[in-house]
Amino acid sequence: MPSISTRLIPPAMLDVIKRSPTLYGVGRKARFALGSRLGARPVAGIGRAHYNDFMLTSTAPDKVASYMAGAAQFVDILEAAVREVGRDWDSIGRALEIGCGYGRIVRQLSRRLPGERIAVCDMIEEGARFTAAEFGATQVPVMERAEPKPEAAYDLVYLLSVYTHLPRDVVARNLADVARALKSGGIAVFTIHGQASAEQAERYEQFWLDKPAVLAAMARAGYYYARYPYYTADYGLTWFSRAAVEALVAEAAPDLEPVSYRPAQLDGHQDVFVYRKR
């Protein structure tokens, strides 16, 4: 069977479309609508995968292998974090993934932690619904919309490539929510674009991104954010230095104490931070 790509438009053409935010918005909405209508299909080497899961760029064997290996690597990172604080999976009564997408990580995590002990949320509600239904997890509201906000509900909260796309003030508010949601001794794991990422900013293949500006801002302030020019929402690419992250956590979530920091541990370009609630 021929491989099927989730990207219907060649990259060069997509860049042309992105120069018109209106045209891009219409096209993105249509693509999501098509994926929603198609739903999920079986993919060799994975199982059922949703057509809107853009982390799976193609059903070609090498892309499937990369999709699965990336998820397995992050679950190994989570396991290492659990062990770093002297715990094991049996002690994790409930875990929360913020920004679950269409279940790439939960697919792997549910092999070590039963689905009924995993909660998921995402701004793309369809993704959270699919993940919960597919892996026996529980869908919960995103922190920004939760009322009341959860308090001391989770032993583990993790965010993969979420703070890599948000401005500093949004990250700060979310960190405060994460600290509130963790039980005493609970673990927070998140990734950011750090210095190593800034030095290879061209890998993100964004025609509008000014790498010298990224490097200059990192050297000056330890922080750089640029909104995707073709999005209407405040969402883009973000970089933090280690010192900037540590200062932000101390300011926004003082109940969290640092456990470990691993520069460029994830896929050679995302830094991993592990914190524990006091």
Image (tube, rainbow, N blue to C red):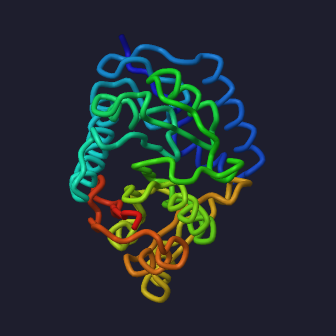
Q: Position of residue 105 (x, y in %)?
A: 39, 37
Question: Farthest top residue?
Answer: 1
Q: Position of residue 143 (x, y in %)?
A: 62, 51
On screen, 6 above or below 215?
A: above
128 sits left or right of 105 in the view: right
Q: Could you say which quadrant of the image residue 271 lies in?
A: bottom left
Of the 4 image quadrants, the one containing the N terminus is top left
Asked whether residue 189 is in view, the answer is no
Q: Of 250 and 209, which appears nearest the observer? A: 250
Q: Position of residue 20 (x, y in %)?
A: 73, 51
179 sits left or right of 58 in the view: right
On screen, 59 above or below 24?
A: above
260 sits left or right of 241 in the view: left
147 sits left or right of 274 in the view: right
The residue shown at (50%, 76%) is 248
Q: Of 227 and 69, which appears nearest the observer? A: 69
Q: Of 50 and 273, which appears nearest the observer? A: 273
The residue shown at (46%, 27%) is 5
Q: Position of residue 205 (x, y in %)?
A: 46, 55
Of the 4 image quadrants, the one containing the C terminus is bottom left
The residue shown at (33%, 33%) is 113
Q: Could you say which quadrant of the image residue 277 lies in?
A: bottom left
The residue shown at (71%, 30%) is 30
Question: Farthest right residue?
Answer: 22
Asked whether residue 10 is in view, the answer is yes
